[in-house]
């Protein structure tokens, strides 16, 4: 089995959010990141349930892609069941990206728009495909990658845990080389920091991945910090390196740690559902954009007619003036 010789990880609420709805798992050979969404504390609960399903894995579900698929399906079951039974958690969901280090490979399972990257030979390669509206528009050639950062529907995702009893999971495996560095991150990093800055920051701090994680979080906050930011690094090697100091996880949802939502403790702002992230099926996601295109298509002929009419009026007035 491939060994993990260096780790780095961290999370931050960012500058614009009141709570951190991200959660993550660093328990070699398993790593995961979850970005929750929902009103009040439901986003925190969704990501916590998903991460908990990964942490509680006992390795009895097989190996490789089969194992990560079953882990994600179990996480989906927990989030969906809680959302269906608890009115305070209704409509919650979460992304989940899981990595499992195996014998010469790393198996990945992925749902949502959190990402997995490989850093090899001083190049940063995105391994996962975002399940989001803007990503679909980029893949279809209707939007450039640069336009995604300011697109009004950039927070619409097309697949998440907890919205249906079953979820489609993208899986794949990467053959590893000694020195390969893998990064899992929430979109709070990639929406604020350009790829070239991410890569240069990693290269500058490569000998200390804990320092790298903190540097990237600082860069995301410097770029605006509009969302929660979470980063997980693990490096493949021949021998396990010296253990790094663990970063503190953010507090549990309640003092007793049972994950129950106490609505009596929520103020009025907390009761307002989160509107910045929404989950819609791919077909419906396209319909969000289609009406605007149809309206624009109807508007263009009307504008042309107005221009022609103005031109005719101009010619008539000029003719009368010449007389």
Image (cartoon, rainbow, N blue to C red):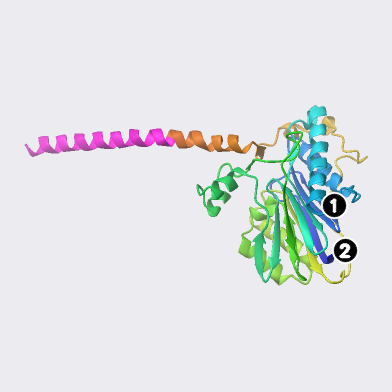
Of helix, strand and loop, which one carries label 1?
loop
**Which quadrant is the C terminus positioned in?**
top left
Query: Quick check: is 303 in the magenta stretch?
Result: yes
Q: Main secondary structure of the magenta part?
A: helix
Residue corresponding to mark 2: 245
Label 1: which residue?
Answer: 249
- Relative side of 45 to 131, left or right: right
Is residue 86 among the parts visible in the rendering? no
Location of residue 211 with respect to 268 vertically, above or below: below
Task: Rate crowding at label 1 as few (under 14), some (14 to 19) or many (20 or more) other CA atoms within 10 Å.
Answer: few
Is 215 on the left-hand or right-hand side of 247?
left
* Region in magenta: 296-323
Q: Secondary structure at mark 2?
A: loop
The residue located at (78%, 52%) in the rendering is 65
In the image shown, does 35 or 78 lie closer to the viewer?
78
Q: In the image, is 294 to the left or to the right of 308?
A: right
Horizontal and vertical percent for residue 167? 73, 39
Q: Nearer the viewer, residue 285 or 245?
A: 285
């Amino acid at each position: 089995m491939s060994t993990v010789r260096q780790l780095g990880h961290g999370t931050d609420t960012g500058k614009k959010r009141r709570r951190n709805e991200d959660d993550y798992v660093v328990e070699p050979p398993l790593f995961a990141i979850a970005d929750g969404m929902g009103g009040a504390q439901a986003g925190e609960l969704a990501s916590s349930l998903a991460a908990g399903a990964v942490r509680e894995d006992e390795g009895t579900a097989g190996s490789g892609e089969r194992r990560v698929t079953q882990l994600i399906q179990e996480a989906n079951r927990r989030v969906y069941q809680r959302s269906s039974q608890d009115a305070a958690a209704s409509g919650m969901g979460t992304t989940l990206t899981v990595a499992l280090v195996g014998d010469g490979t790393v198996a990945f399972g992925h749902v949502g728009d959190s990402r997995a990257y490989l850093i090899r030979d001083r190049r940063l390669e995105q391994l996962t495909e975002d399940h989001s509206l803007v990503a679909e528009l980029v893949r279809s050639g209707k939007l450039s990658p640069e336009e995604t950062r300011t697109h009004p529907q950039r927070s619409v995702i097309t697949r998440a845990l907890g919205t249906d009893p079953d979820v489609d999971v993208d899986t794949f495996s990467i053959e590893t080389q000694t020195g390969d560095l893998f990064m899992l991150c929430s979109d709070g990093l990639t929406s604020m920091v350009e790829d070239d800055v991410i890569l240069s920051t990693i290269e500058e701090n490569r000998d200390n991945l804990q320092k790298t994680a903190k540097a990237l979080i600082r860069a995301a906050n410097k770029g605006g910090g509009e969302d929660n930011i979470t980063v997980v690094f693990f490096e493949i090697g021949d021998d396990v390196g010296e253990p790094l100091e663990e970063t503190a996880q953010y507090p549990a949802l309640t003092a007793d740690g049972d994950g129950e939502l106490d609505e009596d403790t929520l103020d009025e702002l907390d009761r307002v559902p989160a509107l910045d992230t929404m989950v819609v099926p791919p077909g419906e996601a396209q319909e969000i954009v289609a009406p605007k295109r149809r309206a624009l298509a109807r508007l263009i002929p009307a504008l042309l007619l107005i221009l022609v009419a103005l031109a005719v009026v101009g010619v008539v007035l000029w003719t009368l003036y010449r007389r």
